[in-house]
Structure formats: structure tokens, C-alpha cells
Amino acid sequence: MSPLNNVLSSLASGSVKVVDLTAPLSADTPTLVLPEPFANLVDFSLDEVSAYNEPGPFWKHHNIHTGEHIGTHIDAPIHWISGRDGKDVSQLDPARLVGPAVVLDFSAEAAADPDFLIDVHHLRERAEAKGPFPANAWLLFRTGWDQYGHDKQAFLNLDDTGSHTPGFTVECARYIADELEISGIGVETVGIDAGNAGALEPPFPMHYYLLGADKYGITSLKNLDKLPSNGAMIVVCPLPIVGGTGAPTRVLALVQE
């Protein structure tokens, strides 16, 4: 049996299952809030065009209105100034949108401190314990933040001092971008950087280093607790928007039972 037929047979038998890592997209989806004077994207909404009525008697359809970076979405290199000469979302290499999924669990640390930052030593300790990260892998960082996805206030965790959500140190962002042969990273939070990463130098270092190194980032993932730490396969399916800096994305994982 060919490798592909083996996968299809395993899916049919149920020995491999598909786990949806995508947050539902609606007008209630929590979205990033930038402080003044910065401009924000529009939230997702549906505009009914017809619903089995005079404008369309046999069908129902809508116009959609959304920013590129709303809900579960991918950041393409041109999203950030460091990747401004890089690829838009329609140009992302399809072979890099499918690969090994490596889950790193920092849910206990994030529960104790919502401003927790993942550092280089955390990744090195993981690699020493379980082996090096595979080439073309996606590193998926579990912080338990998906539990707040139904509550915008809790998800953004905003107060007078900013947004308090976990992320990465500057050194960790640089290390992932420069030293690891991966395709990208995924997080459960609204953005690939910590809520208060604007205060770091450079500001929003994961955006700066990762996208500048032609790697990709996915946000607002869910169900990472249903994946093994190693051994799953991720499938990342963004809308191929020409000129797009990002796009809403369906993210699936194949997991062996």
C-alpha cells in the first residue's frame, strides 16, 4: 500500500482522526484592539444578500466583511515591516502548510502568570528531553488561552496597563526565526506576540523576527490539548488572497488513535 493510501485507509478506519484546531468565526469572535492613534481592522460580519426569497428564490448567500487578521488566521511575511519584501498569503509555499505538529505545553505557567514569556531555555530543554524539532514542523504553543475564546474581555485581558496574554521573549523569537528549521508557530492567543509585546525591543519581536525570516504564524488556535506532544500532522488552509498580509485559516490536525 502506498503511503498516501495508508493515510486514507487509516482515516476511513478511524485509526487516524481529524482534530479541528480552528476557532469558529462570527461577529462575536474576539479581535485585537490597538490603542489610539493606530487603526483597527473591522470585525467579522455577514451581510445577507438573499435567503430563498425574491433576490434569490432557490438559494441563500451573504457578503462577508472582515479584516485579514480576525479569528484563527495566518500571518504572512509581508504583514510586518521586516518581511515587507517577502511573500503575501497567496504565495505561501503549500509544502510548508502541511507538516509535523509539535505541541509545547505552558498552560500551567500561563495560569500562574498571564504575562508569562516563553524563553530560549524552554525550547532547548524540550529538545533535550524529546529530541530536536523536525524540519518543516509547526511549533504549537499551548497556554490554555483557548478557554477564554467565548469571552472577549477575558481573551484580551485588557486593563489600564495593556493586554496581559502570554508570548515570547525577544531572544526566543530570534532563536525560533534564526536557529530552527521550522515552517511556523501557532498560538491560542489573539496574536503571535504577548499582549504587552509592544514594550519590548524590537516591539512585537515574534512578528519582527519570524515573519522577517520567511516563517509563518497562526493565532487563536483551540483544541491543542487533544494533540500529542509529538506525532500529529498539521494541515494549514488559508484563503490565498493576492496581496493579502494574512487570511482567515482552517487548521486541522491528523492524530493517530
Image (tube, rainbow, N blue to C red):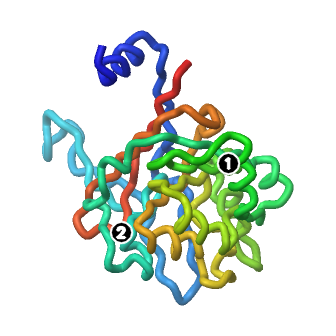
For residue 189, side relative to residue 110 (left or right):
left
Expressed as whole percent of the image width and height from the top left, the position of residue 115 reads: 77, 66
| Figure quadrant of residue 8 | top left
Q: Residue at x 63, y 80 (%)?
A: 198
Camera-side residue of 102 and 3: 3
- SS at circle 2: loop
Report the Cα–Cα distance between label 2 and label 1. Answer: 31 Å
x and y, in percent, of residue 123 in the image: 69, 55
Question: In the drawing, what numbered circle is on residue 245?
Answer: 2
Q: Residues within 10 Å of mark 1 (few under 14, many from 20)?
A: few
Quadrant into which the C terminus falls: top right
| Nearer to the camera, 213 or 29 | 213
Q: Position of residue 127 (x, y in %)?
A: 67, 48
- Crowd tier of the residue under label 2, counting other residues whose Cα lies within 10 Å: few below 14, some 14–19, many 20 or above: many
- Residue at the right extreme, as displayed: 112
- Which image quarter is the N terminus in? top left
Camera-side residue of 127 and 183 = 127
Work out whether residue 88 can be spotted: yes
Amino acid type shown at disc 2: Thr
Tell me the residue at 48%/52% (across/down).
72
Residue 144 visible within the image: no
Q: Identify which amino acid the numbered label 1 is placed on.
A: Ala
Q: In the image, which is nearer the foreground, mark 2 or mark 1?
A: 1
> Relative to 215, is 28 on the left or the right?
right
User: Which disc, if any, is residue 127?
Assistant: 1
